[in-house]
Amino acid sequence: MADVIEADFGSHPLLANGLCHVFGEAAGLVVGLRTIRAPHGDELQVTVSAPALSVPRAVAVVLADPDGQAEADRIGKGVLEALQFAQKLAEGVD
């Protein structure tokens, strides 16, 4: 098992920036989750942010229900793993 997703489940400075969960950081980006109130039901947004961005950018949006929570968790971990892979490629590590 060469590649392990390194998630950060502790407190994170970006939690104060509207994120309710941070999956982790890779390639200078933070992958997080936030809840947004919407007219037809609350939404969960998987976001990617960087220090230069004032607002995290949504990369996926799902309904804020139990199925949506599970899907957002899988998406967030997948985005984090992809960024970790890209970081390793940029660093020249297999």
Image (cartoon, grey):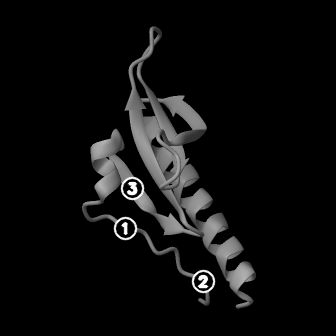
Reply above or below: 60 against 5.
Answer: above
Three-letter code, disc 1: Asp
Q: Position of residue 94 (x, y in %)?
A: 73, 90
* Of pointers 3 and 2, the one earlier in the residue sequence: 2
The amino acid type, in three-letter code, at marker 3 is Val
Which numbered disc flags the more N-terminal residue, 1 or 2? 2
Residue 80 at x, y percent in the picture: 56, 63
**Residue at 34%, 43% in the rendered image:** 17
User: How many numbered marks does the figure carry?
Assistant: 3
How many angstroms separate mark 3 from mark 2 (CA)?
20 Å
Q: Label 2 near label 1: C-beta < 8 Å?
A: no
Residue 46 locus on image (x, y percent)? 52, 43
Asked if residue 29 can be seen in this view, the reply is yes
Task: Report the disc number at residue 22.
Answer: 3
Per the rendering, the mark at residue 3 is: 2
Q: Is residue 65 visible?
A: no
Which residue sits at x=27%, y=45%?
Answer: 16
Numbered label attached to residue 8: 1
Query: For the N terminus, which image quadrant?
Result: bottom right
| Horizontal side of residue 13 vs 5, given as left or right | left
